[in-house]
Image (cartoon, helix red, strand yellow):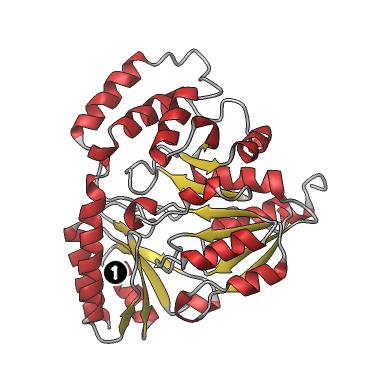
Amino acid sequence: MDFINKRIKKLKAYAVPQVSEGEIKLDAQENPYPLPQEIRGKFSKILSKVELNRYPDPSYKRLKKLIGQYCGLSGDNILIGNGSDELILMLYLAAGGPGKTVSCPEPAFSMYRILSKITGTYYTAVKLDKDFKLPAGKILAIKPDIIFITYPNNPTGNCFEKDKIEKIISRSSALIVIDEAYYEFSGQTMMDYIKKYDNLVILRTFSKAFSLAGLRAGYIAGNKEIIKELRKVQLPYNVSIVNQELLEAVIKDRKVLLKTVKKLNAARDKLFKNLKKIKGVKPYPSRANYILIKLENIERVANSLKKNNIKVRHFESADLKNYLRVTVGTDKENRNFLEALKRAV
């Protein structure tokens, strides 16, 4: 098939592990708590009225206004997509491609590297400094066209120092993308800097804190000129009429939905303290809904968790071969994970 681009032929299709029955799923940073019943009831009423025979509002004006208010911005500062993955692809289409360079501190979210290959953008990884600190000077030295920074970082869970992030934004001519997928857990944001810098965008998702991973929805916040340019690579009707209607309800009732954030943060801190007590286990402090763990015997632990039907995130890279990332689950799921871990180490 000579008509397929050579760079695409070299790739492997992204494979999502199948979920088995009865499995304790702690590998994807999902919120373990389902939507509250009162929200589900509202969803049912909304769905009964949606006119699926009509195309959705291509401008999603009402939804942009609501998200903008949540961010302290105007609706014109918002672009919405089907989860962060589509939005990252839009950023690559607008600012990347052959002849362009993207830089990212690693370890980081794998889709930055994957989508760079798909779009033909040259990817340059910069290893995090000791204790997972942000290597601002090394990133700036590359002079890339796009810089991705996850805040809190995935998978390390820490928030980089704001002064170092601002140093990168202020001294670079690149498009700076701050991925705040876990903002609701950390409470830390760079959103206020959008009004100060015209090369900055903030990326967020409804998949984590809002318990809506199955809905596939996220948004970019940036100055009006950047958003105007990004709309040029946005496919028409990219946000379904169902998603628009449901997300409007979600934003309006966010206080109800986000009650689980406080519960999960408390569970995360408790899990961290219990992990610290286990010999051969080194957990790293986290501001997100997951914890990165370094293990002395990764293979034995991995086999034990598998036997106990507990799925966590393992890594292929050499730098993280002795690490795993565990998503904070319900109290019962966390207990089961700790018990299986203790038996293995």
**Displayed quadrant of residue 283:** bottom left
Nearest to the observer: residue 142 or residue 92: 142
Asked if residue 166 is positioned above or below residue 60 in the image, the reply reads: below
Q: Would residue 100 be visible to someone looking at this image?
A: yes
Residue 83 screen position, x and y as percent: 49, 42
Asked if residue 103 is positioned above or below residue 230 in the image, the reply reads: below
Residue 149 screen position, x and y as percent: 54, 60
Residue 156 screen position, x and y as percent: 43, 69
Three-letter residue code for mark 1: Lys
Q: Give me the residue at 51% from left, 48% from top.
A: 203
Asked if residue 182 is positioned above or below residue 70 in the image, the reply reads: below
**Displayed quadrant of residue 280:** bottom left
**Displayed quadrant of residue 224:** top right
Q: Answer with left or right where residue 54 lies relative to residue 267.
A: right
Q: Give me the residue at 37% from left, 60% from top.
A: 27
Where the C terminus falls, by quadrant?
bottom left
Q: Give me the residue at 54% from left, 31% from top.
A: 76
